Amino acid sequence: MVQESLIEGIVRSFRKNAGWATVIIGLSVVFAVFLNRYIPTVYQSESLLRVMTTEVGHDVSIAASMHGLLAQKSIITQIAEKSGLNESEIRREDVISLVDHGPGLVMLTVRHENPVLLKELGNAIIAVLSENFLGYNSEAQEFEIKALKKKLSHLETSISDIRQEIATRETVTTAKVDDSTLVLENLSHQLEEKIDINGRRLQTVPKEVFYYQEEETPQYKKLNSQLSAQRNELAELFKNYKEKHPRVIACQNRIKEIEGNLKKARTKIQKSRSNSEYVALSAEIASDREKLEQVKSELAKQAAYKTSSEPVSENSPETFALRVKTLEELHRKTLMELEETKIAHNTSAGRINVLKKDARPPQAVGFTSLQRDAIALASGVLLAIFLLYSPAPVRAELVSVSGNILAGAVNMDNRPALLAEPAEIILEVPSLISEPLALPCPSSTDICETIFDERLIALNDPDSTRLKPFKSLVSNLQISISESQTRIVLVGSSRSGAGRTTLLTNTAILLAQAGYSVLMVDANFRKPELHRLFDLTNERGLSEALRGTDPRLLIKETSVERLSLLSAGIVPANPAEALGSQEMIELLANLKRRVEIILIDTPALLEYPEAGIMAGHTGAMVFLHREGEPEEDLHSSRKLLNNVRAKVFGYVKI
């Protein structure tokens, strides 16, 4: 008897459930189609921009300024016209992203479902920023140029008036024009221009900024409290139990469930706050208006003072000539300042250079549509395998022997094919021997007088044919132990009286005779038997070792070389608690360093909890199945072993 391979089992399952497999795979593909339709793949393209602006402040974020410009409806309209997209598509938060990438550097990221439109969208954004953002940042120089032009116009008008007055009149009565008056007038013009520019900017800045904030609901606080309590409980369980213990596993599952609910118990609430930029700009405009009023008041005072302090008198031509000369000198200086400002504005007013642009096709954010379809198809196949594939082994024609196909599983009757036995199907493990074990029967008349206990067939009759299944079992155990690197093996059964002790002792004797150092541990506190088979005492044993006694003082040597026994000892008050304690785990680790193989005897799985607890501690298990045993017991045993995550080499039939 051999187990079918995984591929053979999957193919058999798909043939048997072809209809359901097709439905599951088809639903996965349909889900991928709907996902691509309603949540399409987003592609992105990146461009590194070098922005040459006239701003000298290092604390100014160029990316933030650009974002403020992109918030204007007119700018979005220009981008939509240049790229051919709808304004609603461009206004989405994830379409355009600008991030400062160093001094004067900005990383522009553009995202869209259609990769063909990404290039046009990116070029449109760069063009609109070049036309609007740089002009916005050079407003200071433009304002200075306008102020200088007004000053020149004022000076030219004054010079022209004085020259005309000199030519037409001999005596002119005029107010004295000095440098202080010109400075105040110049400052007045500057403040008026600044107030006008800031007023236009204020119209584009929102008064409030909206943002989202997560808030914890009462349900969240309740779940958080439950999570803390479960974690504390898990910490206490780890003090007494191993991580594979059923109570530990159940507590971990509750923690995972609470954590999942905790993520859903948060809610986002839209809130608003005053826009700091709007407040600062409003304050600046108010301050400039106050300064403008002060300048105008000062001009009025000077005009009144000159009118009252200087009586109207005849001015000589020399006085007019001196005034003209003074105004011409001031005009020359103003003209030179205007030319310098124009040169600076034309050479460094601002420009955008594209330093790096993706030469590759736009990259998908996440999985592409084709990848989603492939993942959906693969997920459908795996889901169909998971739901439809039954891992129960079937008997097949023996072709070769390798790996986990055990040496004893040989078809002796040369029959081409056999059906799987119920124990194999229910337990989902292979049989370790090809024929049932023949246990000794004390009442049988064909058994001669023996030196050792009648159950020790390996010592009483080494050449008996009844020992052949035991030898086959030992060969298979050697293969399994070598492959799994497991040296602690538990012998168990569903109910009492199945012959676990007989199986364990004969197997231990044969392993010791094969050259292994073997230790038998009697963990059956309910009915200890191992010491009786070897005619040994049971005053002290496993229970004393769990209470701290050195196990070297408790292990007893048997009449078989390299075979020793740790008997049960005095039965503890709570056997299940003793075998599931941390001391038991440490004891097994200590014993494993002293011998090569440890065989453990326990009570029946379905009658006492000790066997289930020990199955989680040990490396693997050999399950003893008596012919005619109810299938309900097999189902219950399989469920119990799965709950404690026990590894089972296989089963032995008697």
Image (cartoon, grey):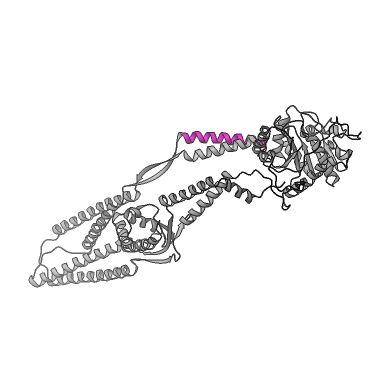
User: Magenta: predominant secondary structure element?
Assistant: helix
Describe residue 2's horizontal placement relative to residue 297 as left or right.
right
Percent x, y of residue 584: 74, 36
Describe residue 508's horizontal placement relative to residue 450 as left or right.
left
In the picture shown, does residue 491 fall above or below 68? Answer: above
Describe residue 348's horizontal placement relative to residue 458 as left or right.
left
Q: Quadrant of residue 470?
A: top right
Q: Is residue 62 visible?
A: yes
Is 177 inside the magenta-drawn segment? no
Percent x, y of residue 95: 39, 55
Q: Quadrant of residue 151?
A: bottom left
State the residue in front, 359 or 465.
465
Quadrant of the image containing the C terminus: top right
Residue drawn at (79%, 47%) of the image: 475
Residue drawn at (17%, 57%) of the image: 305
In the picture shown, does residue 81 fall above or below 30? Answer: below
Residue drawn at (84%, 44%) of the image: 512
Residue at the outermost top position = 573
Q: Is residue 550 visible?
A: no
Percent x, y of residue 375: 51, 52
State the residue in front, 302 or 268.
268
Describe residue 568's horizontal placement relative to residue 608 as left or right.
right
Q: Quadrant of residue 596?
A: top right
- Part of the protein shown in magenta: 219-242
Percent x, y of residue 164: 11, 71
